[in-house]
Amino acid sequence: MDKFRMIFQFLQSNQESFMNGICGIMALASAQIYSAFDFNCPCLPGYNAAYSAGILLAPPLVLFLLGLVLNNNVSMLAEEWKRPLGRRAKDPAVLRYMFCSMAQRALIAPVVWVAVTLLDGKCFLCAFCTTVPVAALGNGSVVPTLPAPELARLLARVPCPEIYDGGWLLAREVAVRYLRCISQALGWSFVLLTTLLAFVVRSVRPCFTQAAFLKSKYWSHYIDIERKLFDETCTEHAKAFAKVCIQQFFEAMSHDLELGHAHGALATTTVASTTPSPTDGTSEERDKLRGITDQGTMNKLLTSWHKCRPPLHLGQEQPLLGNGWAGTGPQAPRREVATYLSKV
């Protein structure tokens, strides 16, 4: 268990590197999935384009959504976007920065899928086999005498060598080489454009908007760290609360067994002992409760945290002094209290 705990803490402390590794693994997995995928073109004029479009677009969409699901910051972004304003305003620039950071990682696997699909050429061959210029690559003298549906039927069978019967019109190898050449050209162009776009986004953009970039990055990290610390504090409080409740239950049970009370008396004792006293539990666990010792108060605290986050101004709310002054206005006059002790 200690090894798993150390691994989990390492992943939490290196979340960015971990997410980059996950995106790399998904990119490799997308390439492996495509290589293992059994591509079967229907070789029908009305279905080739639809089948190819589904193969080219549906898996990247699934991979993109999967990349967002695996990102832990999705829930944080949704929470920050939908939370009430309260005393803390929302910064659209921070939300945009968070979404762009997640989208950039989630787009890696879909981009790899599209690039591999275009470089392979099977999908492009199936989609555009009916657009091959027969007049330039085949027997152009026969084309005017063929009806359009018959010509489309013959060309739609180009991706299927076992059923292609149009060799007298167009050599299948010529059409395959022609379409795969175009597909690979589009694939390398797509790789080049996405690489240039990634370079511009990751390198050039911060140089022109450095101040805004640093602000968005800082507050994005702040929201992430604040959420983690709040979850850790709630977990620590829940453990202390549960420990004190269990201690009180066992103390009440032991007391009931000693006195021989009935079950009703035990319930009364248990209810009465829910109010913490200096003798119940350890002082360390009491300190972790921070004065929140019942379910209703804890629910109010959680609701207040959701509806009214504290303002991002540490000097705005100062703790109350003994005379009720909060430090935000003129100090109230000090009231002296004198106590007399009688020796009688």
Image (spheres, helix red, strand yellow):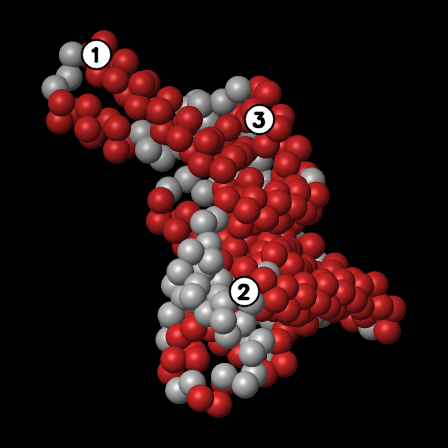
For label 2, the SS is helix
User: Which of labels 1 and 3 is toward the front?
Assistant: 3
Image vertical order of residue 287 relative to residue 282, above or below: below
The Cα–Cα distance between marks 2 and 1, rounded to whole angstroms, is 92 Å
Instruction: Identify the residue at horizontal 42%, vertical 26% (top origin).
Output: 243
At which x and y percent is residue 200? 80, 68
Instruction: In the rendered structure, find residue 93 and report the number of the disc placed on it.
Output: none
In the foreground, 119 or 101: 119
The Cα–Cα distance between marks 1 and 3, rounded to whole angstroms, is 40 Å
Q: Farthest residue toward the right? A: 207
Q: Quadrant of residue 195?
A: bottom right
Instruction: Identify the residue at horizontal 41%, vertical 27% (top origin).
Output: 244
In the foreground, 160 or 204: 160
The residue under label 1 is 257
Image vertical order of residue 338 relative to residue 222, above or below: above
The residue under label 3 is 5
Instruction: Identify the residue at horizontal 36%, vertical 35% (top origin).
Output: 275
| Left or right of 249 on screen, residue 210 | right
User: Which of labels 2 and 1 is toward the front?
Assistant: 2
Q: Quadrant of residue 280?
A: top left
Q: Given the image, on which type of amino acid does mark 1 rest?
A: Leu
At which x and y percent is residue 279? 44, 22
Crowding around mark 1 (Cα neighbors within 10 Å: few <14, some 14 to 19, many 20+) is few
The residue under label 2 is 172
